[in-house]
Image: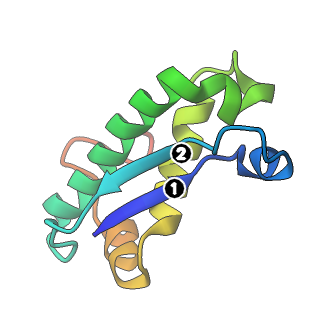
Amino acid sequence: MLITLMSLSMALAAGDPQTEPAPLMRVTYADLDFSDPDQSRRFGERAEREASRFCARHRALVTPSHVRARNYCERSMVAAAVRALPRAQWAFYVRAPAPQGQGATGD
């Protein structure tokens, strides 16, 4: 399985047929067993890595009002990846405990 996320600019691109299609961000997850918290967290790591790559190239198009906001694009795309998960995988992902040594504040 592969999650394909349309960028936030899709609405802009849909209005003009001459415009290039909106860029896509893809995060693979078929090889992960989300019932295992370590593998569930691995999805988050993949989403963060792909968001970083995606935003390095498409930041101005995806989040034009927040180009200078540190990590805004990345956080938005990771959140979109999590929302795009099927319900069962999403439930395991949001319930996975933080890695040892990291609390809710990321300490």
Q: Name the side, left or right, on which 43 lies relative to 12.
A: left
Mark 2 vs mark 1: which is more N-terminal? 1
Q: Observer-nearest residue: 71 or 9? A: 9
Quadrant assignment, res 97: bottom left
The residue that appears at 51% across and 23% down in the rendered structure is: 57
Q: In which quarter of the image is the C terminus?
A: top left
Q: Where is residue 1 in the image (x, y as percent from the top left)?
A: 27, 70
The label number, if any, that marks residue 77 in the structure image: 2
Question: Mark 2 near mark 1, Cβ–Cβ under 8 Å?
Answer: yes
Q: Where is residue 70 in the image (x, y as percent from the top left)?
A: 60, 20
Q: Nearer the observer, disc 2 or disc 1?
A: 1
Above-or-below relation of 27 to 87: above
Residue lying furthest top in this view? Answer: 68
Please, what is the three-letter code of the amino acid marked with disc 2?
Answer: Met
The label number, if any, that marks residue 14 in the structure image: none
Gap between marks 2 and 1 measured at Cα: 8 Å
The residue that appears at 40% across and 28% down in the rendered structure is: 53
Q: Is mark 2 on a helix, strand or loop?
A: helix
Please, what is the three-letter code of the amino acid marked with disc 1?
Answer: Leu
Note whether residue 62 is visible.
yes
Quadrant assignment, res 45: top left
Residue tagged 1: 5
